[in-house]
Image (cartoon, rainbow, N blue to C red):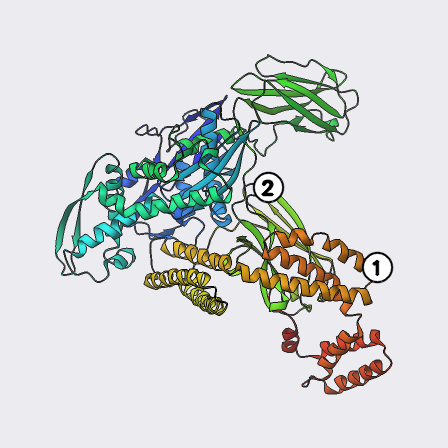
Amino acid sequence: MINFGIDLGTTNSVIARYHEGNVEVFKNPIGHKETLPSVVAFRNERILIGDKAREYLEKDPGNVFGSFKRKMGTDASYWVESISQTRTPVDLSTMILKELRNFIYTGESPDAMVITIPASFDTIQSNATKQAGYNAGFREVLLLQEPIAASLAFVNKTSQQEDKKWIVYDLGGGTFDVALVETLMGEMKILDHEGDNYLGGLDFDNLIINRIIIPYLNTLATFDNLEKELYSSASKYNKLYYILQKKAEEVKVTLSSAQSAPIEFEIELPDGTWKDVYFEITRAQFEATIRDMVMKTIDIVRTVLERNTLQREDLDCILLVGGSTYIPCVREWISQHLNIPVSTSIDPTTAIAMGAAYFAGTKKKQTPAATTVNTSLSNLTVKTGYAKVSQDVEEYFVAEVAGDSKDLKYRITRADGGFDTGLRDLASRITEYLPLVPNTNNQFDLRLFDSQHQLVYHDTSINIVNGKYGILGQPLPYDICIEVDDEKNNATRLEVVFTRNAILPLKKTLTKSLSKTIRRGSDDSLIINVLEGSQSAMPSANLSIGIIEIKGRDLTMDLVKGSDVEIALEMSESRDLRITTYLMMSDQEFSNLFTPSARHVNIGKMLDEINGLRHTFLQEIRAADIREEYETSQQLSNLLSELDTVHSETKMLPDDDVTDRRYQLDDRKKFIAGQLDVFTKDKRKMVAKMDYFNTRNNAQSILDQYGTEDERTNFKNLLVNERQALAADSVPIVESLTAKIRAIVNPVYFRTPEYLISIYHYYADHEGYPDPHAAAALKERGERALANSNYDELKVVINRLYALLPREEQAKANIRGTGIS
């Protein structure tokens, strides 16, 4: 089993181990603390990690780095002055993970590790965390969402949690997660979650700087935008920013137990003189400063409760996790505003690492523990099935045996000697009830023997934990969609593949048709773009996590518009994405495994996207006013005002900004774009349903006249789902049903004389063919086909006239987009 788990935190990190039903949190051999500050310092040839690195911050902040978890999965990097090199968040996280290995005093050197991540980490952030684990020397890295880890620590420490629901409120140093959790029949399940990857104790520290310290400094001298200068790596005040971060964190911690806290530092004034600064910050000031942000976390909890139609009496408690929940007003406001019992029964700082270790104790390493001893029986395979955690006194075990099993016997024993099946004849299927020792790990051995009682197979990996809880899979944090062409609107839209909260791992195969012709050897391309976010949002509001681009020069033959493409998507429990695309016409397959670990946010591009989004808002506000939907108009205006704030704050960012501000602003922009979809959903639903009914009625008419029996049957079968699709209150579902009807009826149009005649006249009236003589000959041929009502011949003429068009004219006939209909 993996057995080891790490909480790789923004502020502090922890490592723990599962052993025989219990979890131990390892302590730092230096200082004997259970937590390791997630801080790295470079001092000439030396690298300092943890407390020593934090102490070095005030002496040389340019060479000390913390809070890099907030930039995981981005293209950010840190310039290290002492070595004249850059280090990425992945590099720094790797150093923390390596240091945590030194905490293990048992002599073990684990090659597999469970590492926790915020539930709202996107795929790119998750893959960056996994890469840090590999770089730290772990051959196998399994990711676990932090609320799940906290809940495992909670249920495995407390008792009588059967058939209960609770909320995990995880407010850490850099991220915030809410999860709705349920225990049922010995399994724990995450029902829903929500979060913010840029909300945590670090933001409280920055609020102290921006709203208390900077205003105070502005009373001492006239600075030229001190806030911007603090954040700019080229400014002389940038080093002061890191010092103030540490000072603000110290103030925050002190105010958890005192009514006021002193802050003291030195600053160079604009006139070149230095001034010692000393003043007191009160708890009342601090609480007023962070109140809006804490209220935002409470609103996120309410969102989860409302989405699941839960009342306070439906919940057992709110479980507090994360170092920032030590702040007294956070606990007070949660209890006051949500009126749900608050639980502090587990240590907020170590709970996630403990839960990771519990999880690791139920996960086998990829390297199999089973071995076939007799090489003459190398074709023998045994597949076992059983629950890895159980609340029962015995657990059902099954094994399927394939291969050369004639005259073999099996024997199952428990490691403590308390159970032994004895030798039994082996069949193709083994079934046993295995008795369990309470509240511990039960290890069983499965052995197979030949007729001479020689051992031919041995499996030592059967472990069942009694009295502990496991997790019924990890939920997907966001919808996973592919981008497809919306030919009707000459745009693209999203089609959902895996829905939010689906349990990982996941697999699905789609069959789509091409929306354009792609010529062999051309620069045209087919794009398989997989995005993560909300299925109801615009593609630009979501995050691209995997793209396969198939260019014309990759093809062995032309791909004709309407031909089929098969797309298989797989996502592992740790959110590796594999895309396999099969082109049926050319019999070609393209495959790739995506583990993207860097998110690029360009300030200039973001400003362009905001301007485009602003234009859309203005259009929608005018349309709402015309419809006299004044409430919607006001809501859209409020969002536009928020977008303008994001715009102005983005413009304020220096190009060399050292904070994670650009990523926060990019997330806010995406959220606003998603809200635009929400507020215009009714209009889009109406348009989608009108389009559906028009398409359906036209299809019925065309199929009645020209459709085959199979086409009419397929159409009739589609309509079976009509009521369910229209009642789903989902624009993509209605649009998807419309697209499926079009896929049935489009080939029929090419059998209707009216349609073929209209298409022929479109090409016949076109001027500017590069080969006018060939075009003229085809037009004469087309006129004869018309006169003789020879529509098969007319199809040939249409296709050849299309082929004569210049490439740029052919492109106009094709939708600009992905190439997938």
Check disc 2 and report its element: helix, strand or loop.
loop
Q: Is residue 66 visible?
A: no
Q: Is residue 331 left or right of residue 750?
A: left
- Place residue 343 in its image quadrant: top left
Comparing 194 with 254, the one in front is 194
Name the residue at the front extreme: 628
Amino acid type, mark 2: Pro
- Distance CA(mark 1)–CA(mark 2): 40 Å
Residue hosting label 2: 505
Q: Which mark is residue 709?
A: 1
Q: Is residue 214 above or below residue 708?
A: above
Residue 819 image position (x, y, % from top left):
64, 64
Q: Residue at x 76, y 77 (%)?
A: 798
| Depicted 457 relative to depicted 728: above or below | above
| Three-letter code, disc 1 | Glu
Q: Is there any visible trace of residue 151 in the rendered image?
A: yes
Nearer-the-camera pick, 248 or 556: 248
Q: If the image is split into quadrants, where does the N terminus sit?
A: top right
Location of residue 817 in the rendering, given as x and y in whole percent from the top left corner: 60, 66
Image quadrant in which you'd find residue 548: bottom right
Residue at 15% over, 46% down? 279
Image position, residue 405 (x, y; %): 77, 25
Q: Position of residue 628 (x, y in %)?
A: 48, 66
Residue neighbourhood size for the residue with mark 1, other residues' Cα within 10 Å, grouped as few (<14), some (14–19), many (≥20): few
Q: Is residue 107 left or right of residue 30?
A: right
Q: Which mark is residue 726?
A: none
Question: Quick one: quadrant of the C terminus?
Answer: bottom right
Q: Crowdedness of circle 2 by 10 Å Cα count: few (<14), some, many (20+)?
A: some
The secondary structure type at the circle numbered 1 is: helix
Residue 267 sits above or below residue 383 on the image: below
Q: Earlier in the sequence, mark 1 or mark 2?
A: 2
Residue at screen point 44% across, 58% down: 672
